[in-house]
Image (cartoon, coloured by chain):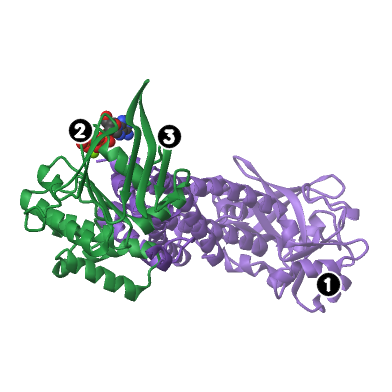
Chain colours: A purple, B green
């Protein structure tokens, strides 16, 4: 008897024959297959490009904040109130020279420089602007980014007693140019309002509204005198050889009366914000995937309904439900894989373009960025792990979307399927 | 041994509120090697009976045995396996898989059964030869005439070396000459392989080929007679 010759196969039909049928079925309605493949491709390309853009924007934001503001590591007094930029003696770092010497001698520390932050006000003819005054050591490499961003005039010199640097937007707003006098006011350590007339030495243009509009730099010694905080600093800011070292070094630097904060700690708010933004983009990702899922499910449902009688024939020939399921899933997966391959190509090309050229959203659009260190030109960054995950997600979604149509075909009774004409 | 045996089998279809008794206590045994025609007016239950014999459907009452094995209560997978290994089908519409060529269509049940490649190739070649389509092996269904498609379907039904081939009005969509050709081929294969054939038909010229004729009416077997067993040349033996 031939049933003895024919080995019972309990598993699925070998991949080859199923694939042969699936492949040719896809070729049957070429336009539909192509369109659904393209839908997958565009969907994934969109996801990759979009997420790549977000990566870049977030990187830029983090890098900008590190470069212009926080550095890699800061030493502050544990009770320093960063929100009010307090100038109280007990909240400021003293003994600067000895500490700086020690820090600069440490392995992995590239730059150590003291800064003093003061809440200030620039008074103009028509309006006053709130500012953050930053007392800096003009010679320190820490401020190279501001030096590089200089758009007019000169940078501060070490012994500058009345010079300030302001950002381009502030200069425009107040109608100031290098050489002009700028009246500044601060509330000093004793709570008294101090006023002074400074000379605009130079104007910087970082492209970041948060700095260009509301920061003024002056020499540390002048700032200390202005704010009645002689010999003290709000923080010692460090640049490290490697940013990744920050957390490790922070642990070794903790000493009584001082607290070391890494850029991760200092950007907690930024991190929180980025987390929120990411969740929002996940929602967008989910919507794109949903659209892809609907397209695939629709294509497959149409394919199933068109071929109900064929399903009946296959069942009559002895194909099991599971094999019929596999057949349709295979078709969906083939569309999905092809679409993903094209989508990865398009998406990576998109991000590469963003990486090199970027999109200029213009300054006006960016005024909504508030106090985030976000430039008007957005770049992208390729994150291969992310691309892989997005691809796997897309494939998983396609698999899920094809499950119902495939299951519908598989669970049909052969007689019902054969009756269809 | 008997190829298939129906014991007091009934099948009822629900049409809205009412019930339609398509088969009403049918008992019928088809021995191995038979060449049997099922005749009867439209709606008498021929198709329904073939579907139950072929394990495409399950009866509401009674038992179905294939090669002496009770298959009435088998699950879907076991029924699929049984169809794959022991039963061939030929339908009125030329039920080929449209994306596969003639060779691949005949090969498909062998692939499903896990028959090794060399064996598959020789069986398919042999069967295509037997139905006179060796030169059409790599034509797709839409490149074949109706008669040729039906011959491929016959070859495919025979490929797994089943004990039973069920053919539901295999010639109904063919002209006289092609219908005759199909019957001659089936008869030849029946005699050569000993596979039992059961075919439903309205056509007396087709009935003439049968060695046994079963008559149905209103879901019951109402009579049975020996057939003429017309020889391939058309004259009764
Ligand atoms: N799925 C179904 N649902 C409802 N009624 C059905 C179904 N299949 C068949 N019937 C009914 O069962 C009866 C028997 O049908 P069957 O198809 O077996 O007849 P048949 O002898 O093959 O007829 P024909 O010669 O026209 O093919 C008919 O009255 C038919 O309408
Ligand atoms: Mg019928």
- Above or below residue B186? Residue A295 is above
The image quadrant in which ligand 1 is located:
top left
Residue denoted by label 2: B42
Marks 2 and 1: CB-CB under 8 Å?
no
Marks 2 and 3 belong to one chain? yes
Q: Is residue B137 visible?
A: no
Identify the residue at horizontal 73%, vertical 72% (top origin).
A240
Find residue A100 and name its label: 1
Between circles 3 and 1, the one closer to the viewer is: 3
Q: Position of residue B51 (x, y in %)?
A: 32, 43
Q: Name the residue furthest top.
A: B17
Task: Name the chain letter of the residue that bears numbered label 3.
Answer: B
Q: Quadrant of residue B11?
A: top left
Label 2's element?
A: loop
Marks 3 and 1: CB-CB under 8 Å?
no
How many marks are shown on the rendered structure?
A: 3
Q: Position of residue A181 (x, y in %)?
A: 64, 54
Task: Name the chain letter of the residue that bears numbered label 1.
Answer: A
- The answer for how far apart the CA atoms under marks 2 and 3 are is 23 Å
Residue denoted by label 3: B61
Marks 2 and 3: CB-CB under 8 Å?
no
């Amino acid at each position: 008897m031939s049933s003895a010759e024919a080995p019972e196969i309990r598993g699925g039909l070998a991949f080859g024959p199923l694939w042969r049928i699936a492949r040719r079925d896809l070729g049957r309605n070429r336009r539909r297959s192509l369109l659904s493949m393209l839908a997958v491709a565009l969907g994934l390309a969109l996801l990759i490009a979009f997420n790549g853009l977000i990566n870049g924007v977030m990187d830029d934001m983090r890098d900008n904040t590190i470069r212009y503001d926080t550095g890699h590591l800061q030493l502050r007094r544990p009770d320093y109130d960063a929100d009010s930029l307090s100038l109280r003696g007990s909240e400021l770092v003293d003994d600067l020279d000895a500490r700086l010497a020690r820090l600069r001698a440490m392995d992995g520390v590239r730059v150590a420089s003291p800064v003093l932050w003061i809440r200030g006000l620039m008074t103009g003819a028509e309006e006053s602007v709130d500012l953050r005054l930053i007392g800096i050591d003009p010679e320190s490499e820490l401020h190279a980014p501001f030096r590089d961003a200089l758009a007019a005039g000169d940078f501060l010199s070490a012994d500058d007693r009345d010079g300030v640097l302001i950002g381009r937007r502030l200069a425009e707003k107040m109608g100031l140019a290098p050489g002009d006098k700028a009246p500044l006011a601060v509330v000093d350590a004793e709570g008294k309002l101090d006023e002074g007339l400074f000379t605009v030495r130079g104007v910087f243009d970082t492209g970041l509204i948060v700095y260009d509009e509301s920061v003024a730099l002056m020499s540390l010694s002048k700032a200390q005198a202005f704010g009645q905080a002689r010999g003290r600093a709000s923080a010692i800011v460090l640049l490290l050889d490697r940013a990744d070292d920050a957390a490790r070094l922070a642990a070794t630097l903790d000493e009584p009366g001082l607290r070391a904060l890494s850029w991760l700690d200092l950007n907690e708010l930024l991190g929180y914000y980025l987390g929120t933004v990411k969740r929002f983009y996940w929602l967008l990702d989910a919507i794109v995937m949903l659209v892809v899922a609907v397209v695939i499910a629709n294509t497959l449902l149409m394919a199933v309904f068109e071929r109900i009688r064929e399903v009946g024939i296959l069942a009559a020939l002895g194909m099991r439900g599971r094999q019929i399921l596999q057949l349709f899933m295979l078709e969906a997966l083939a569309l999905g894989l092809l679409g993903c391959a094209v989508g990865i190509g398009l998406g990576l090309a998109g991000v590469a373009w963003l990486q090199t050229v970027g999109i200029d959203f213009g300054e006006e659009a960016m005024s909504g960025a508030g106090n985030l260190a976000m430039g008007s030109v957005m770049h992208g960054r390729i994150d291969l792990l992310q691309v892989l995950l997005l691809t796997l997600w897309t494939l998983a979604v396609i698999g899920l979307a094809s499950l119902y149509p495939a299951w519908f075909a598989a669970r049909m009774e052969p007689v019902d399927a054969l009756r269809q004409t | 041994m008997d190829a298939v045996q129906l014991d007091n089998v009934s099948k009822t279809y629900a049409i809205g509120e009412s019930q339609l008794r398509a088969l009403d206590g049918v008992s019928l045994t088809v021995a191995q090697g038979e060449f049997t025609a099922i005749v009867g007016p439209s709606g008498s239950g021929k198709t329904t009976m073939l579907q139950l014999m072929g394990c495409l459907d399950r009866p509401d009452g009674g038992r179905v045995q294939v090669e002496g094995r009770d298959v009435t209560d088998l699950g879907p997978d076991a029924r699929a396996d049984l169809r794959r290994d022991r039963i061939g089908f030929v339908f009125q519409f030329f039920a080929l898989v449209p994306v596969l060529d003639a060779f691949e269509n005949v090969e498909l049940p062998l692939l499903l059964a896990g028959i090794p490649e060399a064996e598959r190739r020789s069986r398919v070649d042999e069967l295509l030869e037997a139905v006179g389509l060796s030169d059409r092996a790599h034509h797709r269904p839409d490149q074949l005439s109706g008669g040729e498609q039906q011959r491929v379907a016959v070859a495919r039904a025979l490929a797994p070396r089943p004990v039973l081939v069920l053919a539901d009005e295999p010639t109904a969509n063919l002209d006289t000459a092609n219908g005759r050709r199909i019957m001659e081929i089936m008869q030849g294969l029946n005699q050569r392989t000993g596979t039992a054939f059961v075919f439903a038909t309205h056509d007396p010229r087709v009935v003439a080929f049968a060695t046994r004729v079963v008559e149905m009416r209103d879901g019951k077997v109402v009579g049975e007679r020996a057939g003429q067993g017309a020889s391939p040349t058309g004259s009764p033996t």
